[in-house]
Image: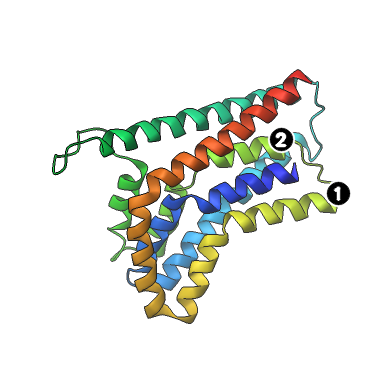
Amino acid sequence: MVLDLMLIALAITLDPLPLMGFALVVSSARGVWKGLAFILAWLACFVAVIAAVLLLTGGEPLPPRSPPGVAGLVAKLAIGIGLVFYGLHRRRLMRRADGAPAGAAAPPGPATPEERADEVAKGLDESSVWAAAGLAVLVQPWGMVAAGATTVLEANASQPSTFAALFGFCLLATASLLAAELYLVFAPEMAQARLLRLRGWLKGHAQQAIVVICLVLGLYLTGKSLYQLSG
């Protein structure tokens, strides 16, 4: 369980979309407070999901061969396959964009998650910290959070090490945002400028990062779930 949680948390913290949204949030008025609201809402999502799973299981790991245990593995398998297909879909979009003639307009299509987050984040300058908190919920990588939830089904709440693992999951999944917020607190002007430059760089490389993260995590979850189901 611990290894799976840490891998999922690493994938979440490396996801470029939340950091891109966070960079826009902290570059607006009262950026430090909006960044804090963003992080607290981000963490609240993890805590709510973990608490819901522990309440559902009563804090006891599901027996591997019981119907609920098998259902949990099937859910994790479905999430893994979904991440793989999503990664392949984003790769196909990336290759289509790369193959377009220079100067040609991009073909019309549904807005990407990055574009939808941009539209919300750009209106934050005159809004409250509650809007920043709402953006954190919007850019949450819910597919990976769901993968974490299926892993928490194996948690044994009677062991202190379980809570250490869950705390480590929340901390690692938030590490990039926490680092950016601390940088902003101690060097606000420099941090804002560098975060905006980082966002510009991420905007040009987000597709590649999302493809790699989704394919690696999706293949890992799919392979492990199949192994556990067949074992």
| Residue for point 66% across, 35% down | 150
Q: Which mark is residue 42?
A: none
- Mark nearest the camera among 2 and 1 is 1
Residue in the image at 32% along x and 45% along y? 116
Q: Which residue is mark 2?
A: 56
User: What is the x, y in percent for residue 39?
Assistant: 51, 61
Query: Is 5 rendered above or below residue 41?
Result: above
Q: Residue at x 63, y 41 (%)?
A: 148
- Secondary structure at numbered mark 2: helix
Q: Amino acid at mark 1?
A: Gln
Q: Percent from the top left, x then y, of residue 188?
A: 41, 78
**Residue 229 picture location, percent across and down:** 73, 21
Which of the 4 image quarters holds residue 103? top left
> With 132 as the anchor, is 84 left or right in this view?
right
Number of callouts in the render?
Answer: 2
> Dividing the image into 4 quarters, which one contains the C terminus?
top right
- Secondary structure of residue under mark 1: loop
Q: Amino acid at mark 2?
A: Leu
Is residue 182 visible in the rendered image? The answer is yes
User: Can you say whether 170 is above or below 69 in the image?
Assistant: below
Left/right placement of residue 206 relative to residue 147 reads left
Looking at the image, residue 229 lies above or below residue 80: above
- 146 and 194: which is toward the camera: 194
Task: Identify the image quadrant of the N terminus.
Answer: top right
Question: Could you tell whether 123 is left or right of 158 in the image?
Answer: left
Residues at marks 2 and 1, CA–CA distance in whole angstroms: 17 Å
Between 60 and 210, the residue placed more toward the observer is 210
- Is residue 30 at least partly visible in the picture? no
Binning the other alpha carbons within 10 Å of mark 1 as few (below 14), some (14 to 19) or many (20 upward) gives few
Q: Quarter-wise, where is residue 25 in the image?
A: bottom left
Instruction: Find disc 1 in the rendering and name its residue.
Output: 159
Out of 217 and 151, give the one closest to the viewer.
Answer: 217
